[in-house]
Image (cartoon, rainbow, N blue to C red):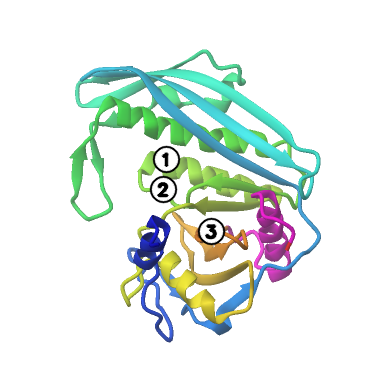
Amino acid sequence: MKSLRGIVDIINVPPLEKSYTSAFQGGKYNIYPITPENYIEIKDDEPVKIMFVDGGDGSILSGASFDVSILRFAGVEYDGIHDGMNKKIHYAVILTQRQGESFRTEIYDTDLPEDVFRNIEKLNIDIYEKGREKNEFTEVSPAEVSSSIREMMELKFAEYLMNTMPEGSALVIDGTLRRWSDYINTAMQNLDSAARGKNIILTGVAKTTRIKTKEGPSITAAAMAMSKSVPYKVWRVKVADIRSETHSANIYVAKLNPISHYAYRVEVNHTKDDENEINRVFNTMAHNVGAPNR
């Protein structure tokens, strides 16, 4: 009997090519082909101390000119592999209001130190958001602005937690190491700079990606298809790297769980390009995402 899972698998798995080439645009990317010989097994190794940071927002009350949202920020720290877990959860409420041709946000009810979110209330955010394409602008709603403010506050929260981490640790955030809104990317650059200063390996994990290959499928779908030609249960394959003022990262597709049907886009900053150290980060992530013993 045919199952929905089977239909999804057929849709997700593209025809297997000899190689795939990532089609990154808008920057000086060095591109690496997705071929079997470029796959690297994520091997068991000495773990690193690692902190996972994420956040979320929910609109409580919203109208044409305002939004009230509750925000949640969480950091989960491991001393190694499933060892010494420490959770840090904080909340905040924000009020976003339209004032003429811009938005302003006020922060309430947070138990974090005042300087963590310094200058956010001083931001004037234009009602028109620049998109990814040149000269593409769309008018944004107060709720959308609140969500963007949460994203920026999440990065500042990550920087706050990083101050408690020892040198050589890894900080894993949700998403890539490049954000498209200028004010959010400024927060990202500040986080990246602070990570370099403390020798922290800043890592971004994106569950989805818009990046396609020149052959058609996304880089994650292509990497999963090509992985059928390699013997590894968990792996990473480098698809690109870039070194610029707004985006500096090694970019991989990685499968972190041997029984998973999916792979993720993973970015690692250029604190170090030591392959052994990078493997330690991937190995620690793989074990702490619920993967069974390999």
Of mark 2 and mark 3, the one earlier in the sequence is 2
Left or right: residue 23 compared with residue 77? left
Q: Give the SS element for disc 1.
A: helix
Q: Residue 287: where, in percent of width, then height? A: 70, 54
* Crowd rating for badge 3 (residues with CA inside 10 Å; few <14, some 14–19, many 20+): many
In the image, residue 129 above or below residue 114: below
Mark 2 = which residue? Answer: 179
* Quadrant holding the C terminus: bottom right
Of mark 2 and mark 1, the one earlier in the sequence is 2
* Crowd rating for badge 2 (residues with CA inside 10 Å; few <14, some 14–19, many 20+): some
In the image, residue 104 above or below residue 210: above
Q: Residue 274: where, in percent of width, then height? A: 69, 68
Q: What is the number of the mark on residue 266?
A: 3
Left or right: residue 173 compared with residue 106? right
Q: Pointers 2 and 1 in contact (CB under 8 A)?
A: yes
Residue at left offset 67%, top offset 29%: 88
Residue at left offset 19%, top offset 40%: 138
Left or right: residue 252 compared with residue 89? left
Which is in the foreground here, disc 1 or disc 3? Answer: 3
Distance between mark 1 and mark 3 Cα atoms: 19 Å
Q: Give the SS element for disc 2.
A: loop
Residue 64 falls within the magenta-colored stretch? no
